[in-house]
Image: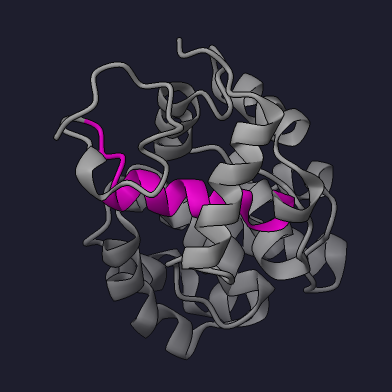
Amino acid sequence: MANTLTYAEICECFRRFHAAEPEPKGELEHLNAFTLVVAVALSAQATDAGVNKATRGLFAVADTPEKMLALGEEGVIEHIKSIGLYRNKAKNVIKLSRILVEDYGGDVPSSRAALQSLPGVGRKTANVVLNMWWGHPAQAVDTHIFRVGNRTGIAPGKDVVAVERAIEDNVPAEYQRHAHHWLILHGRYVCVARKPKCGACLIRDICAYEDKTT
């Protein structure tokens, strides 16, 4: 595990991320809070590009829980069968749609606990929705953030919850809202798993990673 960077070093990392991309955006396409919940739930063990390709047609015909229920499980499957684990994911989409209609009047709840009570929605999914839709500074830690947090020393932790807490504890408040997007994008395109592109890294001189590439 990398050494934790100092407060000043973490500030400088995020100052650079902000300067390069002031308003980073998630790459999952969505139309409203409901379609965002569905898209994030479908993205488990799948790429955002693959999910977007499948959901464009799905959301064109079912952008509310009521319409999703009317489409039915088999109808959902027809749209998402290019995504891994599509049968189980289709079941969850129908189940969560029914719960939203029956328990929440068709609206997506805005508390983490309520979101996590929905089938197929874990802590990471809930945090993505809280952050992207409601602007809450929730940190959705995926494999990219886990790797970047530990490798750079920005937010080291032995598991995703520990890294989430490290981001909350160590990243200055003014960068909290966009922190997880900056870290995800950095991990997806620069600080990649097998051979990080250290030569193109904005924070190369600050990063605690000892085995930097050229």
**Closer-to-camera residue (132/117):** 132
**Quadrant occupied by the N terminus:** top left
Along the horizontal axis of the image, is 97 left or right of 47?
right
Exactly how many numbered labels are in the figure? Answer: 0
**Quadrant occupied by the C terminus:** top left
Examine the structure image and report whether residue 189 is included in the region drawn in magenta.
Answer: yes
- Rendered residue at 76%/52% (across/down): 137
Against 161, is 115 above or below?
Answer: below
Residue 28 in sight in this render: yes
Instruction: Say which quarter of the image contains residue 207.
Output: top left
Place of residue 63 in the rendered image (x, y in percent of width and height, measured from the top left): 57, 82
Place of residue 209 in the rendered image (x, y in percent of width and height, measured from the top left): 36, 21
- Image color mode: one colour
Residue 46 in sight in this render: no
Along the horizontal axis of the image, is 184 left or right of 140?
left
- Rendered residue at 35%/37% (across/down): 204
Against 77, is 56 above or below?
Answer: below
Place of residue 38 in the rendered image (x, y in percent of width and height, measured from the top left): 54, 63
Residue that lies at the very extreme toward the bottom in this rendered image: 60
Examine the structure image and report whether residue 52 is included in the region drawn in magenta.
Answer: no
Instruction: Say which quarter of the image contains residue 203.
Output: top left
Q: Look at the image and give the residue range highlighted in magenta.
A: 176-193
**Closer-to-camera residue (99/136):** 136
Place of residue 62 in the rendered image (x, y in percent of width and height, measured from the top left): 52, 83
- Rendered residue at 80%/72% (across/down): 107
- Rendered residue at 83%/59% (across/down): 110
**Overall secondary structure of the magenta stretch?**
helix
